Amino acid sequence: MSADLAASPSPQAVGKLLVELGLADPTDDVTLRRLTGGASRATFLVEVAETRYVLRVDGDTLGAGHPLDVEAELLSIAGAGGVCAPRVHAVESGLATLGAPFLLMEFVDGRTLPKRILHDRELARARTLLPAQLGDALGRLHRIPLDHAPAALVAAGDEVARWRDALDSYGQPHPAFELGLRWLDDHRPAAVPEVILHGDFRLGNLIVDESGLRAVLDWELAHTGDPREDLGWLCASSWRFGGPRPVAGLGEYEPLLDAYAAQTGLVVSVEELHWFEALATLRWGVICLGQTMRHLRGTTRSVELAALGRRVCEVEWSLLEATA
């Protein structure tokens, strides 16, 4: 079942936790409100004594990312490296405190919905700042030494081979994906040293306000690999949400890549980035197919998974355009 069906923790249990952490008094009233979004985990806004926190709670989810304790470690490592990430207050992988694994972190105000980030008038200035800020944030993450990474992070390996194997496992003909795989094989860029990757760096996983980027969220798909993978995922057509520009639908390549190079010393060309955009498009298409197959094969019956099936042909078209 999805995170929407995960049990809600009681305000009393959360209040007791806050008291133990020194974040509330025993007499304070605690309220919990379910937030929108969060397909893989239940997320709650916690309010106590005019202070807000964010509580993420595990259930039987659709996701297959890192456990919350690993995500908490990633948030702390990223924050120490200068990436704007929410501060972690508590994390527990057991059931004793709230009846489920949880992560309690600071509340960061701002927008997360891509359509609002792309179109709200009050964010007009932020949209001009974001490409450079996003390049800076990724640069700060990617320059963190690999030996600082949590032990749970694994190397991506050959991404083209990985997604070819995944596609083959579904036993369905998808010529557009096969053509995309051949193009990726034929146009591989030279390798560069691996780094810690966010794994899902895009609008929807970022908090933005009038000043621009406020926080990077949802680290559950982090791994190690080619740094250009994160840049390509951010710029893939599927994550532009209808915006006309290549960087997250709202900006141009130059400020993104210049800010990234300033932090890392790695100069990424638009031609290199285009290859990783095509890889990201292929990856998303095969993910959509895989999620749909989970529903069709009866592994996980879900309207949410079934709805992803209509995305497959859209992504195939985008991949054909990207590799033409």
Image: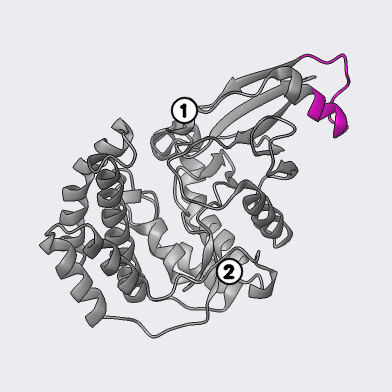
What residue type is disc 1 on?
Asp
Q: Is residue 118 above or below residue 176?
A: above
Would residue 8 be visible to someone looking at this image? Answer: yes
Tell me what residue is drawn at x 39 percent, y 51 percent: 248
**Mark pair 1, 2: CA separation:** 33 Å
241 lies above or below 246: above
Residue stretch rendered in magenta on the structure: 16-29
The C terminus sits in image quarter: bottom left
Q: x%, y% of residue 299? A: 32, 42
Q: Residue furthest bottom?
A: 190
Residue 205's tag is none
Q: Is residue 167 left or right of residue 101?
A: left
- Considering depth in this image, is 291 or 25 the residue closer to the camera? 291
Which class describes the residues within 10 Å of circle 2: few (<14), some (14-19), or many (20+)?
Answer: many
Name the amino acid type tagged 2.
His
Is residue 252 in view from this perspective? no
Q: Position of residue 76 (x, y in %)?
A: 71, 54
Magenta stretch encompasses residue 24? yes
Whichever of labels 1 and 2 marks the residue nearer the N terminus, that label is 1
**Viewer-side label of 1, 2:** 1
Q: Quadrant of residue 275?
A: bottom left
Please identify the quadrant where the N terminus is shown.
Answer: top left
Q: Is residue 206 above or below residue 178?
A: above
Name the quadrant containing residue 204: top left
Q: Identify the residue at image location x=22%, y=41%.
A: 296
- The secondary structure making up most of the magenta span is loop
Query: Residue 219: x percent and y percent?
Result: 56, 52
Is disc 1 surrounded by few (<14), some (14 to 19) or many (20+) residues within 10 Å? some
Image quadrant where residue 119 sits: top left
Q: Residue 4 — which label?
A: 1
In this rendering, would 306 be left or right of 210? Answer: left
In the picture of the structure, the residue carrying the numbered disc 2 is 142
